[in-house]
């Protein structure tokens, strides 16, 4: 089976004199979990945008689900770091989730999409909030709603950008268990700033991104490995919002 993400010698820069990614290589197998870590400015968000087809590389090859990123987009679920939900907008949680399955020209949802939305809310343990306004939920609850919205179209690949940014430690743990369980049906890629969080994942690949990409199994990640890649000391035991490199 071909990798669901295959990147070879990828080159990308916003400024011709300052490469963001250079000769980057990455392979991700189907039904697997990948964490993406690295310092601010290292290229994590750019990598996600390239996978989503929002940016075009200047060199190298990238295929997603055996297609170009643009053609694969409909089979990718995406949960951005900032969901920018208007907390005062009077939309119910269930309707937010269903909207992830509807086409722009669709007037009303299909019955099976409504049923799937209910099932996902139950799986994510937030079905009791189905009729609540989205603005009444906590940050962690809203994040789960957005994950349900990304999953309702049953994507083959789920991308999450900093999904634990507004979640407490207990919420993080349960979210990770949930994300790990999702690899039975799809590939999951999660960007995180926090090395300590990533090391909680037992059977995952870690992509360390800092202009190029180094792949490791979680069990291989040590202080020495990270410091060799980033060239300076890091705090491996940090829990919230510490990079595996200095911010820049």
Image (cartoon, helix red, strand yellow):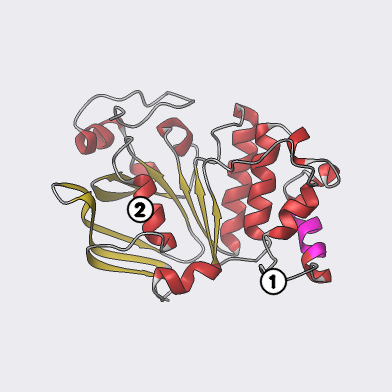
Q: Residue at x 40, y 61 (%)?
A: 51
Q: Is residue 243 above or below residue 109?
A: above
Which portion, as a residue range, is magenta? 114-120
Mark 1: secondary structure: loop
Magenta stretch, main secondary structure, is helix
Q: Nearer the viewer, residue 55 or 32?
A: 55
Quadrant of res 155: bottom right
- Find residue 47 and name its label: 2
Q: Residue at x 25, y 24 (%)?
A: 233
> Which label's residue is closer to the chain start, 1 or 2?
2
How many labels, in total? 2
- Find residue 105 and name its label: 1
Within 10 Å of the Cα at label 2, are there few (<14), some (14-19), or many (20+) other Cα atoms? many
183 left or right, relative to 223: right
Q: Position of residue 32 (x, y in %)?
A: 48, 59
State which quarter of the image contains the N terminus: bottom left
Q: Is residue 218 above or below residue 139?
A: below
Quadrant of res 208: top left
Mark 2: secondary structure: helix
Res 3 seen here: no
Quadrant of res 243: top left
Q: Residue at x 78, y 46 (%)?
A: 91
Q: Residue at x 19, y 31 (%)?
A: 231
Q: Is residue 165 above or below residue 18?
A: above
Distance of mark 1 from mark 2, alpha carbons? 31 Å
Q: Is residue 207 above or below residue 225?
A: below
Res 247 seen here: yes
| Magenta-colored stretch includes residue 231 | no
Q: Find out whether the residues at labels 1 and 2 contact each other: C-beta distance under 8 Å.
A: no
Q: Nearer the viewer, residue 205 or 171?
A: 171
Q: Nearer the viewer, residue 203 or 236?
A: 236
């Amino acid at each position: 089976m071909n990798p669901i993400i295959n990147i070879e010698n990828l080159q990308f820069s916003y400024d011709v004199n300052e490469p963001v990614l250079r000769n980057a290589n990455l392979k991700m197998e189907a039904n697997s979990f990948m964490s993406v870590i690295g310092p601010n400015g290292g290229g994590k968000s750019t990598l996600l945008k390239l996978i989503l087809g929002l940016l075009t590389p200047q060199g190298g090859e990238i295929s997603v689900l055996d297609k170009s990123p643009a053609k694969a987009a409909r089979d990718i679920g995406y949960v951005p770091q900032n969901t920018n939900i208007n907390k005062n907008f009077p939309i119910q949680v269930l309707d937010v989730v269903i909207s992830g399955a509807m086409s722009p020209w669709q007037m009303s949802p299909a019955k099976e999409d409504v049923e799937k939305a209910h099932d996902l809310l139950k799986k994510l343990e937030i079905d009791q909030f189905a009729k609540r306004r989205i603005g009444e939920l906590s940050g962690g609850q809203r994040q789960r709603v957005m994950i349900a919205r990304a999953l309702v179209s049953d994507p083959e690949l789920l991308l999450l950008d900093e999904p634990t940014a507004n979640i407490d430690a207990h919420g993080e743990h349960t979210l990770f268990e949930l994300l790990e369980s999702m690899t039975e049906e799809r590939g999951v890629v999660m960007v995180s700033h926090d090395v300590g969080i990533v090391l909680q994942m037992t059977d995952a690949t870690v992509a360390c991104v800092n202009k190029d990409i180094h792949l490791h199994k979680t069990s291989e990640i040590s202080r020495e490995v990270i410091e060799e890649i980033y060239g300076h000391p890091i705090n491996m035991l940090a829990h919230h919002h510490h990079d595996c490199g200095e911010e820049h």
